[in-house]
Each structure stands twice: as structure tokens, then as C-alpha cells.
Amino acid sequence: MSFRAVKGMNDILPGAIELWHELEHAFVEAARRYAFDEIRTPLLEPTSLFVRSIGEVTDVVQKEMYTFERHDESLTLRPEGTASAVRAYIQHSVHAKDPVTRWYYKGPMYRAERPQRGRHREFYQAGCEIFGDPGPACDAELMLMLVDLFEQLGIPNIRLLLNSIGGSDSRSRYRDALVAYLTPRKAELSEESQSRLEKNPLRVLDSKNPKDREIAAGAPSTVDLLTDDDRVHFDELQAQLRALGVPYEIDTRLVRGLDYYSRTLFEIQSEAGELGSQNTLVGGGRYDGLVESLGGPKVPAIGFAMGLERILLAMGSREVPRESVVAILPLGDACTREALLLAREVRRAGYRVDLDGRSNSLKSKLRRANATGAAVAIVLGEQELAEGRVQVKNLTAHQQLDAPRAEVVNVVAAQLTLAAAQKGGS
Ligand code: HAM
């Protein structure tokens, strides 16, 4: 019997990981420039944290959580990062130290969804959350950061979709209007939507059922029922986006699948990467009531999370240049002892060194060095060892020279420069 990774969960191997590093580095660098600090929270949280924040009548909580009991406590693998960030924010009384807090995070999330292209059961998110500032400039800044990041990553044809569902007053007005619209059509709705109509009518708008979607298309729009304050926030956000030259589309059907949102909701989608229905790269929005509803102070907040697998698909495959390697090839035990020291010296000088200490022939060591793309090989045989020399082979420029043992680091530096020039010129 052979083992395979759990369905919907993926290994990321060398060859693929380089593009992940590029993406993660670009995200962290953008977060740095926008003054976000990193947080790391546990992968496991009490189940009730997600039920209370994401909402009992949501797909994530009803169908997708990995939940188990341990030590009489129900635990869940985090399906997203916002609930954990809010829990940590409250637990460490962060609001008492600074009125505005900007956090970012990245890491794996878990949802037992049906796997398909761009949808996995273990997937990586990178996200930002801002606590303590109710103003629309936060909303605009997050969107600007993302639009600039995607441009830098070369992702074509992105669409920023925007909506506002308002605060609790607007939402209860909207809820009433939606119930009034849906109730006479109840019999035509799917069974699931009929039950959602009772418990959480907004979720009916999330339904994938074609008939439900048809009915949802005629539903009243959230934007028409905003209170004056909510409308001012939404209008100012749009004015700011226009001032920044960030294109957006208002999508009044955008409700998103999590219950904690208030006011601004947004998504970034892209047609790149053949993602089909999984083309939402980023989801985000305000959650001005969540900190308080989880037992913390009354602190407004907004954030987003992006799915790294989807962004990588949208970026498309591309060659990421790999760092040159110096191969050290000792021939025999005494030479291997010396080679260990030599490798340490070259590594201390900052180079990437692959010591091939296998007891095989020089020919097969060189074959591997060439196959792994080593730029320079240092050969150390009995004779070189006795004479205090090494043989340096430039595998890119196809040259060979003898060098004093003491000069190895300088010679390696010069040969790597030569190899890089040769590679650039070829
Ligand atoms: P979300 O819309 O559930 O929002 O997820 C955000 C993004 O994570 C999606 O747009 C998608 O790119 C990615 N994603 C979600 N599920 C999967 C999956 N099964 N496979 C691959 N990628 C997936 C949130 O999680 C909120 N916490 C975002 C947020 C932060 N709102 C405020 N702050």
C-alpha cells in the first residue's frame, strides 16, 4: 500500500516553490510598505469562535469545517484568518496599546469543499486586517495596495467589485425588504434557500442553485436601503477610488459568504488562469461589529484575504531563475573531511554549496552537478589534498583551473561572476 496526500491537499515541491516565494515576498513587501506587522496565530481554534464570527447559517460553518474533540473541547482547523486575528486582538488587549492596528498574516486554511481547479481543502491565504479606523480611506488603501500588487505580479484583466451592505440599521432594513421580496416566491426556492429564508435571508443570495439565482437577480439592492451614514461612507470611498484612478464596478448582488461583514464588501476577480467559477482572487470587507460581538471593545475593522493558489494560477507559469550552486566533490574519506571544512568556508562567504560526499566516481558526481545546474564545481582528490590545492571547474564557461586551497573563496567568487556573464550572454 502506498500513501497519498489527503484529497484536496497538495504538496508543493522545488520547481514550483520558487514562484510561491516570489508571490509571498511581493505580498510581504507590499504589507511592509503599507506599515502592516505580521501576526501568527494557531491553526486550531475553539470551534465556537468560527461559529460565532462566520455565522451558524453559512456554508463554511455548516458544511466545511474540520472539527474534532480533544480533551473535552471542540476544536476546528481554521477555515480563514479574520476570526483568529480578532480573537488575538481581544485576548492581548491590543486596542489599549494603540488606537489603530495594522496586521498581516499568511498561512494554510482548511475547508472541506469539493476540490477543483483553484479550490482546495488545504489552501493558503495572505491577508491584512486594520483595527480601529472607521474611515473609508482604510478601505481605499487596501484596494489600492491589491491593485498595485496584481499589476506588479503581471496579472491581467482584474476586476474590483464593490458593494455596501451598510451597518446593522441598514442591514435590518435590507433584511426586511429581502424577506418581503422572497416570501411570496418561497415555494420556487430550493429547499436549502427556503430554510435560509427563515434563519439568514441574506444567504439566499449566495445560493448556487440556478432557480434561486434567477429569483435573487430580481431582489432589492442593498445600496438602495443604506442609512445616510452608510451612504456617506460608501460615496466617499468611491470618490477616493476615483481620485486614485482605481477602476471599480458596483455589484449590488455581492454579499459574500461570511456573516461578520458590515458596510464595504469587495472582491477582486480575474479571468486569467482559467479559473472559471473560482476566479475570485481576493475577498474582503468591513466588520465594524465583530470585535465587540466576540467580547471585545467597540472597535471598527476592515480586511481582506487572497488565495495564493488562485493568484499563482492567474500569474501563469514562468521561469524563476535559481540561485547558482557551488558543488564540492571530494574523492575519498580524507578528502571528504577536508571538504566539510571547505564547504563551511564557502557557505560562510554567503554561497550556496552542495557537498556531494557519496563514495562514487568523479564522473558520476560531475553528472549530478551538471544535472542540478551547479555553476562551479570544486574537486578535491588525494593529490590536491596533499599539495594544498583544489581543482575548480567552471561548468558554465567550461573552463578548469588549479587554485591554492587558501584562495578558494576568492576563486569561487570570480568563477561565479564569469559563469553569470557567460549565462547572460548565451
Ligand atoms: P473568503 O472570501 O472566504 O474570505 O476567502 C478569501 C479568498 O481565499 C478567496 O477569494 C479565495 O481566493 C481564497 N479561498 C477561499 N476558499 C478557498 C479554497 N477552498 N481553495 C482555494 N482558495 C480559497 C475570507 O476568508 C475572509 N477572512 C477575508 C477577510 C479578511 N475579510 C475581512 N478580512
Image (cartoon, helix red, strand yellow):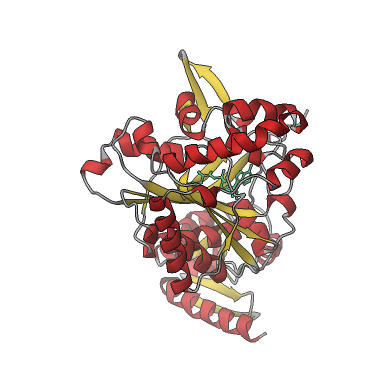
How far from the left and from the top, in percent, is residue 257? 58, 40
- Rendering quarter of residue 113: top right
Q: Which residue is drawn at 63% across and 58% down?
A: 269
The correct choice, above or below, for 189 with respect to 140 in the image is above
Task: Using residue 186 as the reference point, say whether residue 344 is left or right of it.
Answer: left
> How many marks are shown on the rendered structure?
0
- Rendering quarter of residue 370: bottom right
How far from the left and from the top, in percent, is residue 208? 72, 40
Confirm whether residue 84 shows in the render: yes
Give the quadrant of the N terminus.
top right
Task: Using residue 124 as the reference point, say whether residue 235 is left or right of it.
Answer: left
Between 2 and 74, the one nearer to me in the picture: 74
The correct choice, above or below, for 186 with respect to 362 in the image is above
Confirm whether residue 324 shows in the render: no
Q: Residue at x 74, y 54 (%)?
A: 276
Give the quadrant of the C terminus.
bottom right
- Rendering quarter of residue 191: top right
**What residue occupies the far left of the structure in this picture?**
97
**What residue occupies the far bottom of the structure in this picture?**
425
Q: Which residue is drawn at 56% across and 24% down?
A: 67
Between 124 and 85, the one nearer to me in the picture: 85
How far from the left and from the top, in percent, is residue 243? 44, 73
How far from the left and from the top, in percent, is residue 349? 40, 67
Between 55 and 413, the one nearer to me in the picture: 55
Task: Using residue 90 as the reference point, say whether residue 167 is left or right of it.
Answer: right
